[in-house]
Amino acid sequence: MYNTEHKPYFSEELLRWYEINKRDLPWRRHRDPYYIWVSEIMLQQTRVDTVIPYFHRFIEHFPTIQALADAPEDDVLKCWEGLGYYSRARNLQAAARQVTELYEGVMPSGKEEVSGLKGIGPYTSGAIRSIAFNIPAAAVDGNVMRVLSRFFLIEEDIMKVKTRTKMEDLVLTLVPEGRASDFTQGLMELGALICTPKSPKCLVCPVMEHCSARLEGKEESLPIKTKAKPPRREDRLTAIVEGTGVHAGKILIRKRPSTGLLAGMWELPHVLVDSGEVPPGSLSESEAMNHLSEALLIEGVPVTPNSYVMNTEHIFSHIHWHMGVYRCTWQDAPITGLQAAESAAAYETGIEHFRWIEVEDMERYAFPNVFIRILNAYFSL
C-alpha cells in the first residue's frame, strides 16, 4: 500500500505553488469548455510550446463548436497540418457535430455525456470537466502518474489499467473542495515543469519535503513503466511525378482513403517494398526505380523514374517508414494493359483522389509532415 499520510500537505502546497508559478497559456485565460477541449486534444503527445500557435490558428478559423461542426473536413485537416495524429482532428470535428446535434452546440458537463463524445477518453473527460466546470474529476495522464508515483511511492506499472484506476481514485481524494480546476492544472503543471521524466528538479519542488520517492532515493527510478514495442519497419518508395503537356510544371498528388492511417490526407504516390521478398534497405537505386515504376503501373499510375532525390523517415506509434524518394515523369505514351490504360486516362482528366499541383497549391491541401518535407525540398531545388 502506498503512503497516504501527507495528502492534505500535498494538495495545499501544490495549490499554493500553482497560484504563483502557473504559466500564462491562452486556454487558461478563461474557462470556455470548447477552448479547453481543443487545447487538451492538441496537447496529447505534443509539447505546449508547439501547440500554442496551432491553438490560436484553430480558434481563429473555428471560434465556436458550431463553426467547427459546419466546416469542411479538408479545412479542419489543413488547419491541423503539422500537429500530426490527424485522427485527433477528425474525432474533434465529429464530436463537435455530436454536441451540435445532441446538446444544441453547448458542451455538456456530465461524465456520461462528455465521455460519450468521439475521441474523448477518461483523461480528456476528466480534464474538461474539472478545468472548465470545476467538477472534481480525475484527469490522469503521464505527467500526473509520474507525480503520484513519486510522491506516494506507487511502485506499480503505470501501463496497467489497474494502476491507472488506482491513481484516478487517489486523485479524487486529493481535490480540495471548490478547487478542482486549479488542482487539476497544478498537478499537470508540476509534472510538466518540475517532476520531469529525467533529472527532476526536486530542490524547487513544492512538495519535496514529504515526497516518498525522494526520501528513499527512488525519484529517478519511478514511475515503473513497461517499454512499448518498437514500431515495425516499412520500406517505401515515393514518386515525385512531374507532369507533361498540359500538366507541365506540376506534380501529381493523391488523397488517402477516408479511413485508416492518415485518413483523408494528401500525399505523393508511394509503394511498400515487401520485406518478405526483399530485405529492408537492400535495393539498389536502379532496382528501386524499377520496383516503383512497376508497382505504380499496377495502380494505374504510369511513370518513368529518372533520378534519386532523397531519403527520409517518418515514425508513427506503430510503424517506422523508411522512404526513398525518386523524381519521375508521367508517361504520355499508351500503356499496355487495360487496367493501366483506363486508370491513366482517368487520372489525366483528374478524378477525385488525384490532383496536379504547383507549389502555391500546397496551401489548399493538407499533407502529413513527411510529405511537406519532401515537397518543400523538391520545390526549393
Image (cartoon, rainbow, N blue to C red):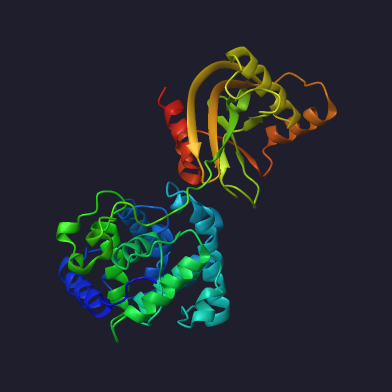
The residue lying at 54 percent from left, 69 percent from top is 95
**Nearer to us in this view, 10 or 71:** 10
Q: Determine the residue located farthest toward the bottom in the rendered image.
A: 177
Residue located 50% across and 20% down the image: 309
How far across and how far down the image is residue 216, in percent? 26, 59
Position of 104 relative to 306 (above/below): below
Residue 152, position in %: x, y?
Answer: 32, 68
Question: Residue 35 location in percent, x, y?
Answer: 37, 69
In this view, the residue in front, 98 or 182, is: 182
Image quarter hosting the C terminus: top left
Q: Is residue 197 visible?
A: yes
* On screen, residue 39 above or below 360: below
**Is the residue 72 above or below the residue 363 in the image?**
below
Query: Looking at the image, which residue is at 46% across and 80% down?
Result: 106
Residue furthest right in the image: 338
Residue 371 seen? no
Which corner quadrant of the image does residue 51 belong to? bottom left
Quarter of the figure that contains the N terminus? bottom left
Q: Is residue 64 above or below residue 229?
A: below
Q: Is residue 108 left or right of residue 12?
A: right
Q: What is the tally of numbered marks visible in this picture?
A: 0
Report which quarter residue 208 is drawn in.
bottom left
Residue 299 image point, x, y percent: 73, 32
Left or right: 25, with 89 as reference point: left
Q: Nearer the viewer, residue 147 or 61?
A: 147
